[in-house]
Amino acid sequence: MTSTDQHPESPSPSASPATPAAAPTRSVVVVGDDGVARCSWSANDAEYRRYHDEEWGTPQHDPRALYEKLCLEGFQAGLSWITILRRRPAFREVFHGFDPARVAAMTESDVQRLLGDERIIRHRGKIEATISNAKATLALDAPLDELMWGFAPRGARERPRAWGDVPAVTAESTALSKELRGRAFRFVGPTTMYALMQATGMVDDHFAGCFRAGR
């Protein structure tokens, strides 16, 4: 992996598992060998299936977990999410379990060390953003979960039934991006923030027919 942060699996930039760019021609729901119907993006990889079943779309309110997800979504920009998911244990190790206070204390020597660590994505800008985002998190006047969830969509929302039903950007993700940028967060563009909303259950984009839909 080079510092340019490219990967042969890469879909279009910032594609989350359920964006149209991730798999535009596949069926939206498939039945696995266990007889369970799932969003099709999770069908062909055991770790993706676990992530789909246990994490993706589950409401997450823990501030540290949200900081971690924010940073990993930033690392994912330009890559497939499975690339990040497979490296998550190493990310957690090198970034001290995504404890904002410990990450904020990291220095240039730490950045240099991580640029040589092949277990993670060796991208200087994204590594530095993880550190600056920790500092921005500590500087907030309210917990990170309160800030983020304040931008979650309100009211009923029609469940997606086709890839084209899943947006890449929404008014809410654009507003969240603007708010975070104004608070010195980095790698928090509107598309990345919509992927974050999907991952943390601020929106439920499990397709109609998936066993997780509406849970």
Image: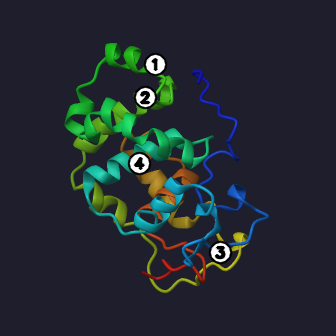
Looking at the rendered image, the disc whose residue lies closer to the viewer, 2 or 1, is: 1
Write down the quadrant of residue 108 in the picture: top left
Q: Is disc 4 placed on a helix, strand or loop?
A: helix
Q: Residues within 10 Å of mark 4 (few under 14, many from 20)?
A: many
Q: Nearer the viewer, residue 157 or 5?
A: 5
Q: Are marks 3 and 2 in contact (CB under 8 Å)?
A: no
Residue 170: quarter of image: bottom right
CA distance for labels 1 and 3: 39 Å
Q: Amino acid at mark 3?
A: Val
Residue furthest front as drawn: 33
Q: Which residue is mark 3?
A: 29
Name the residue at 35% across, 46% down. Answer: 68
Q: Please state which of the two labelled residues, at mark 3 or mark 4, is closer to the viewer.
A: 3
Residue at the image point whose x is 44% and y is 21% from the top: 117
Residue beneath disc 4 = 70
- Dot placed on the residue nearer the N-terminal end, 4 or 2: 4
Q: Residues within 10 Å of mark 1 (few under 14, many from 20)?
A: some
* Image position, residue 95 (x, y; %): 31, 33
Find residue 115 and name its label: 1
Sequence-wise, which precedes: disc 2 or disc 1?
Answer: 1
Type of colouring: rainbow
Q: Amino acid at mark 2?
A: Ile
The numbered dot on residue 127 is: 2
